[in-house]
Image (tube, rainbow, N blue to C red):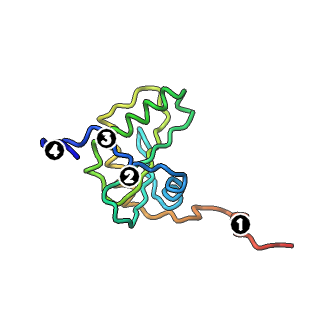
Amino acid sequence: MGDPTGNPPATLPGSLRLKTQQHFRRVYQRGRRAAGRWLTVVVCPRGEVEPGPRVGLSVSKDHGGAVRRNKLKRLFREAFRLERHQLPGHVDLVMIPRKRDEDFPLGELRRELVDLCRKALASKPQGRDRGRARPRRDEQEDRS
């Protein structure tokens, strides 16, 4: 809970994080994407009763060593923590930082996160077979 002044709590509770591979896979398969200067977000509405958005982070090794990747994750979690009251409730989102050599400014991340979430939810759903030319192996007929 926040303090009496209305500030958000200083930590992000585990209940607001995506933790399992199944949760991430669901967001990637059913979610809508929006990309900005600093990050890409994938937003997936969920019908659960749990209030508030949940966040997952995907930081590839292209961003550098473990120290830099963990620093980026802390920064992105902080942006989410400070802006989660501005984000739509009942959504799961995955934040993916864009490859940049310069430092990521927290203020710009916060603004871009809110804008991209709204943009992604307003966009047309992409569906499961986004441009796949042929069915997956498990969807093909048995040709024996």
Q: Which of labels 1 and 4 is toward the front?
A: 4
**Residue 110: assigned label:** 3
Give coordinates of residue 56: x percent, y percent. Answer: 44, 47
Residue lying farthest to the right in this orientation: 144
Q: What's the residue type where badge 4 is placed?
A: Gly
Which of 86 and 14 lies nearest the eye of the viewer? 14
From the image, tell me which residue sits under label 4.
Answer: 6
Quadrant including the C terminus? bottom right
Give coordinates of residue 31: x percent, y percent. Answer: 47, 59
From the image, tell me which residue sits under label 1.
Answer: 138
Distance from disc 3 to disc 2, alpha carbons, whole Å, reads 16 Å
Q: What's the residue type where badge 1 is placed?
A: Asp
Q: Which of labels 3 and 2 is toward the front?
A: 2
Which of 118 and 68 lies nearest the eye of the viewer? 68
User: Label 1: few (<14), some or many (≥20) within 10 Å?
Assistant: few
Give coordinates of residue 111: x percent, y percent. Answer: 30, 42
Distance from disc 4 to disc 3, alpha carbons, whole Å, reads 18 Å
Distance from disc 1 to disc 4, alpha carbons, whole Å, reads 51 Å
Q: Quadrant of residue 71?
A: top left
Question: Along the polypeptide, which appears first: circle 3 or circle 2?
Answer: 2
Distance from disc 1 to disc 3, alpha carbons, whole Å, reads 41 Å
User: Label 4: few (<14), some or many (≥20) within 10 Å?
Assistant: few
**Residue 54: assigned label:** 2
Q: Quadrant of residue 134?
A: bottom right
Question: Along the polypeptide, which appears first: circle 4 or circle 2?
Answer: 4
SS of the residue under disc 2: strand
Question: Along the polypeptide, which appears first: circle 1 or circle 2?
Answer: 2
For residue 116, above or below residue 135: above
Q: Which of labels 1 and 2 is toward the front?
A: 2
| Circles 4, 2 touching at the beta carbon (< 8 Å) | no
